Image: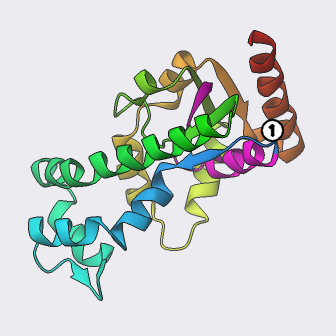
Amino acid sequence: MIRIGLTGSIGMGKSTTAKMFAAEGVPVHDADATVHALYSGRAAPLIEAAFPGTVSDGKVDRTLLSPHVLGKPEAMKKLEAVVHPLVREEEQLFLQRARADHRRIVMLDIPLLFETGGEARVDVVVVVTADAQVQRDRVLARPGMSEDRFEAILAKQMPDAEKRRRAHFLVDTGRGMEAAKRQVRAILKALAATG
């Protein structure tokens, strides 16, 4: 079974690209979606114990959690120590199900793939990219986004040029949806040919 790691910086179109792979029949495990589910489930009491007053109605309230961890590297490490093992457990269950279903190719959608050493858990890395101006325009069009917030997010992410350098395949979403779909199909064709 070939495990594709999908990553890309904010505003590059990673979520849209993951949906393109899914539309081609590739099972996708979304790390962000898993975190959201865990915040409403298993992780909530653990996060409340680590950061009292951050859970409301049985769910982690991100607005209550934010002041505890933003700009606080030690607190962020504490949060990651709670959440990351649970995300890995869910990922392992996803891979077990895919093996049981005899899937030849699966995808792990991991936003901070390189930053967290996730490339060691995959066979192939696909980086979603676009021109820097396209990225900036997309992100700043999001509700509640500011230049400062965008710059802060970028500062936490490996530069796009470095991600591109480390990728096995690229999907450039700056050339439109149809071009991106063609690139996705070309990647899957290349992987199928490798057996």
Q: Is residue 52 above or below residue 88?
A: below
Left or right: 79, with 127 as reference point: left
Disc 1 marks which amino acid? Ala
**Quick one: 112 or 93, which is closer to the camera?**
93
Give coordinates of residue 190: x percent, y percent. Answer: 79, 17
Left or right: 27, with 52 as reference point: right
Kindly identify the residue that appears in the image at 77 percent across and 46 percent down.
Answer: 20
Q: In the rendered image, which quarter contains the N terminus? A: top right
Which residue is under mark 1? 180
Q: Is residue 185 above or below residue 178?
A: above
Label 1 crowding class (10 Å Cα cut-off): few <14, some 14-19, many 20+? many
Give coordinates of residue 88: x percent, y percent. Answer: 36, 43
Give coordinates of residue 43: x percent, y percent. Answer: 27, 65
> Does any portion of residue 43 appear in the rendered image?
yes
Left or right: 83, with 53 as reference point: right
Kindly identify the residue that appears in the image at 69 percent across and 34 percent down.
Answer: 103
Kindly identify the residue that appears in the image at 59 percent across and 50 percent down.
Answer: 11
Left or right: 106, with 83 as reference point: right
Kindly identify the residue that appears in the image at 42 percent across and 50 percent down.
Answer: 90
Residue 115 occupies quadrant = top left
Give coordinates of residue 79: x percent, y percent. Answer: 20, 55
Highlighted magenta segment, given as a residue range: 1-23
